[in-house]
Image (spheres, grey):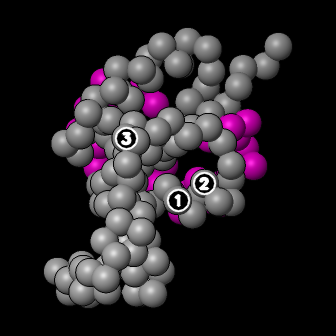
Amino acid sequence: MQRLRLAFFSPYNPQRTGVSDYSEELLPYLAEKADVDLVAGPYELSNTAITSRFRVLRDVEFRANASRYDMAIYQIANSFDQHSYMIPHMQSCPGIMVLHDYHVNYLVSGLTLSQGDLPALRGILRPHYGDQASALAWKLLLS
């Protein structure tokens, strides 16, 4: 039986997050069962024990070779800076999403703001903030 080939999306060290620590601790155990390539954001990984054992790809490289993988695994939390690069891949290459936060409001609002979609942001905020949603949406957009 052929081993699974996995694309593992996550923040990695030096990104300061529990998700990067969790992922780096999990990877050696996952590698016992599957061939794993790491897909990282736009920074250099700092853990040489990880970089010497696993192939590291940028998301553009993954997109060009997505068909080589049996599955993608996405480690998702609430940081726009650390997780937003994964979202387009989740839409085009479905896989397993491991959700590390129950609320991903900063990720969703960051994605919405990065697309310049102020009406959508108001819609997201309105159920909780009511009449203050529009003013808050503008504050978020400008800060």
Q: Residues within 10 Å of mark 3 (few under 14, many from 20)?
A: few
Q: Quadrant of the N terminus?
A: top right
Residue 101 is labelled as: 3
What amino acid does circle 2 point to?
A: Met
Q: Which mark is residue 87?
A: 1
Q: Kindly indicate the quadrant of the structure image that contains residue 83.
A: bottom left
Specify whether 68 is left or right of 78: right
Write down the residue under mark 2: 90
Q: Nearer the viewer's eye, disc 3 or disc 1?
A: 3
User: Does the image show residue 141?
Assistant: no
Magenta-drawn segment = 44-72
Q: Residue at x 28, y 29 (%)?
A: 21
Q: Residue at x 68, y 38 (%)?
A: 71
Q: Nearer the viewer, residue 112 or 23?
A: 112
Which label sits on residue 16?
none
Secondary structure of the residue carrying numbered label 3 = loop
Residues tagged 2 and 1 counted as in contact (Cβ below 8 A): yes
Whole-number angstrom distance, CA of label 3 to CA of label 1: 15 Å
Residue type of the residue flagged with mark 3 = Asp
Between discs 3 and 1, the one toward the N terminus: 1
Q: Position of residue 42 (x, y in %)?
A: 34, 59
Residue in view at x 44 percent, y 45 percent: 76
Label 2 – label 1 distance at C-alpha:
5 Å
The amino acid type of the residue labelled 1 equals Ile
Q: Secondary structure under badge 1?
A: helix
Label 2 crowd bin: few (<14), some (14–19), many (20+), radius 10 Å: some
Left or right of 18, for residue 126: right
* Corner quadrant of residue 128: bottom left
The answer to whether 119 is drawn above or below residue 81 in the figure is below
